[in-house]
Image (cartoon, rainbow, N blue to C red):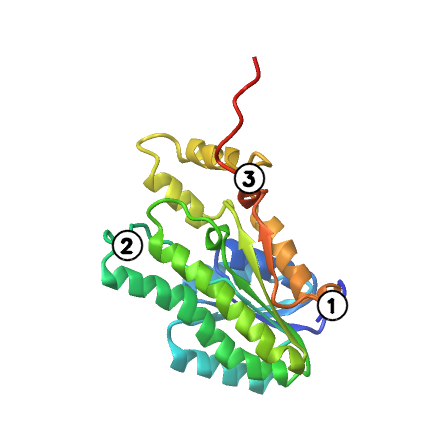
Amino acid sequence: MSDGSWAGQVLLVTGTAAGIGGGVADLLVRAGATVIGVDRDADALATQAQELAGAPGVFQPTTAEVTDQDRLAVVADQVRAEHGGLDGLVCAAGIQRYGTVDGTDPATYAEVMDVNVAGAFNTCRVAIPLIRARGAGSVVLVSSAQAYASQSAVAAYTASKAALLGLMKAMAVDHSPEGIRVNAVCPGSIDTPMLRWAAELFSGGRPAADVVAEWGASHPIGRVGTVDEVAKAEEFLLSKRASFITGADLKVDGGLTAGLAAALPEAD
């Protein structure tokens, strides 16, 4: 774990080719870390590797599906052989699907839970022994503000993000005696490719940027967040600066879950 500089530290990040996973991988590599970047998109990983080629740290692109336990075991063996262990892990791989309980087919529900929950479980399962080999380390799971309060028609997604908080707490209890801290970040609306995709989906022909701005206005801060803002929160939880924090869920949501939708009437 780091107190600021990540030189010599080895971390694994899933979902690293875009969005929140990409943001924290970028931050860590530019701070000197070696990051094993896991994603299913080989082309995007190659582009990311090119962008980080001159950084102080090292980015190691690694193609894998977090739902593929056998492939993750191979990745873990490679990490063990090359680095001896891990200093940290960020589980950021995830997907968004829409639908109510009766409007979501079983295959879609299974897909969401398999990627968002089982994907994190599978990754932690192979990574915890690698962190244990270092004697201490930190894990950060990427949950969501929707673990606390849901939008309409996101039943499977909300269930998956709430489940991640339960997994985080169980791991924190189990692995704290080994010097392994486990926490979660819970972002609100963050300007990622996934958010832009959702904005296009619900734009009704309007510019997606207008939809994103409307979603941002629902946050007390008045805008959507940035990938860098979430990455800095993740980096803090990974670092020694958070040495007494485990089992915590850090909201990075611009105040979204702090307010109530019912506003007082305007005074005359």
For residue 203, say whether it is visible.
yes
Q: Are marks 2 and 3 in contact (CB under 8 Å)?
A: no
Badges 2 and 1: C-beta atoms under 8 Å apart?
A: no
Q: Identify the residue under disc 2.
A: 101
**In the displayed structure image, the side of residue 83 where residue 44 appears, left or right:** left
Residue for point 48% across, 74% down: 123
Q: Secondary structure at mark 2?
A: loop
Per the model, the C-alpha gap separating discs 2 and 1 is: 41 Å
In which quadrant will I find the C terminus? top right
Q: Earlier in the sequence, mark 3 or mark 1?
A: 1
Q: Which mark is residue 240?
A: 1
Mark 3 nearby-residue class (10 Å; few <14, some 14–19, many ≥20): few
**Of residues 22 and 237, the one drawn nearer to the viewer in this rendering:** 237
Q: Position of residue 122 (x, y in %)?
A: 44, 76
Q: In this rendering, is residue 107 above or below 129?
A: above
Tell me if residue 19 comes above or below residue 67 in the rendering: above
Residue linked to disc 3 = 259
Query: Which numbered disc, 2 or 1, marks the residue closer to the eye?
Result: 2
Q: Earlier in the sequence, mark 2 or mark 3?
A: 2
In the depicted structure, whether residue 171 falls above or below residue 235: below
Foreground mark, 3 or 1, reads 3
Considering the numbered disc 3 on the image, is that residue within a helix, a strand or a loop? loop
Left or right, residue 19 beside residue 134:
left
Verify CB contact (< 8 Å) between mark 3 and mark 1. Answer: no
Residue found 52% across the figure and 47% down from its top = 188
Q: Compute the Cα span from label 3 to label 1.
A: 32 Å
Residue at left offset 51%, top offset 33%: 217
Q: Position of residue 30 (x, y in %)?
A: 66, 60
For mark 1, does the 10 Å Cα neighbourhood hold few (<14), some (14 to 19), or many (20 or more) residues?
Answer: some
Q: For mark 1, give the secondary structure.
A: helix
N-terminal of the pair, mark 2 or mark 1, is 2
Kind of residue indicated by mark 1: Lys
